[in-house]
Image (cartoon, grey):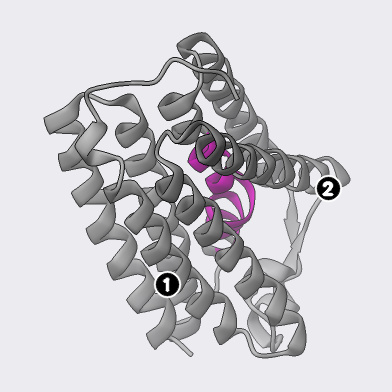
Amino acid sequence: MWIFPLVATFISALFSGAVLRQYSNSANPAHLVWAGALFIFAVATACDFIGSFSAWTSLVAKVYYFTGATVVVGFLASGTLYLLAPRKLAHAWLAAMVAVSIMAIILLAGAGVDQYQLIHGSEPGWKAIEKPAALTVLAVSVNIAGTLVLLAGAVYSSVRRRYPLANILIAAGTIIVALGGSLTRLGHYEFQSIGQAVGIVVIFAGFLMTAPLAGRQPQATL
C-alpha cells in the first residue's frame, strides 16, 4: 500500500532538514551525519513508494536495497559515535562506512534482477535482486555492528548520564524500524513502512534531545 511509504518519505525528508538546521546552529558533526542518515531513509522510503504506487524497476529496487537495507543503520551509528566517542574513532567509523557504501554500490551494480518476479511477484521489488553472498554478508554485518553501537551508546549514556534519553530513543527507533521489516515475513508488507514512519519519529525525538547540549561534546569512549 503506497500511502505508508509516502508518509514515511515525507517525515524522513522533513526531519532531515530539521536536523540539518540543528547542525547549522550547533556545528555538531553528529547532527550533520544524522541529517544524512535521515535523508538516506527518505530515499529508501521514496523508492518503496514508487514501487508500490507505480512499478518496481531494477534501479528502484537496487537503490532501495542500498539505502534501506544496507547502509542507513551504519550512518545512524556514526552520528552516535560523533556524539559520544573520541573524534578519531568517529572518523574511522565514518571512513569505514564510506568504504562499505562504495563496495555495496559495486556489488549491487553487478547483481542480476529476476525480471519476472520484479514485475509479476507479490513481494516488494527489492526481493527480486539476485544478491551475491558478499552483498548479503556486507548488509548483515553493517546492520548488526551499527545496532550494537547504538545499543552500546544507549547503555553508556545512561550510565554516564550523557544524553541518556536521547540515545535510548535513537536505539529504540532503530529497533522499531527493524521490527517493521521483520514483520513483513507475515505477508503484510505495509508493516515495513509503518515501522519506518514510527521509528523515524522516535529517532528524531532522540536527535532533538541532543540540541540543548550540542555545543558541548563529551569526549568519552564507548
> In the image, what residue occupies the spot 77% across and 48% down?
140
| Highlighted magenta segment, given as a residue range | 61-77
On the image, the x and y values in percent for residue 181 come to 65, 71
Residue at the limit of the structure toward the right, as seen here:
133
Residue designated by label 1: 197
Q: With respect to residue 169, does 8 lie above or below?
A: below
Label 2, label 1: how far apart the Cα atoms are: 29 Å
Q: With respect to residue 37, does 87 lie above or below?
A: above
Depth order, front residue of 162/142: 162
On the image, the x and y values in percent for residue 37 come to 42, 45
Q: Amino acid at mark 1?
A: Ala
> In the image, what residue occupies the spot 65% across and 70% down?
179
The answer to whether 45 appears left or right of 11 in the picture is right
Q: Secondary structure at mark 2?
A: loop
Q: Secondary structure at mark 1?
A: helix
Single out the mark in the foreground, 2 or 1: 1
- Magenta region, mostly helix, strand or loop? helix
> In the image, what residue occupies the spot 76% across and 81% down?
185
Q: With respect to residue 45, does 43 lie above or below?
A: above
Residue 185 seen in this snapshot: yes
Depth order, front residue of 207/134: 207
Residue 110 seen in this snapshot: no
Residue designated by label 2: 132
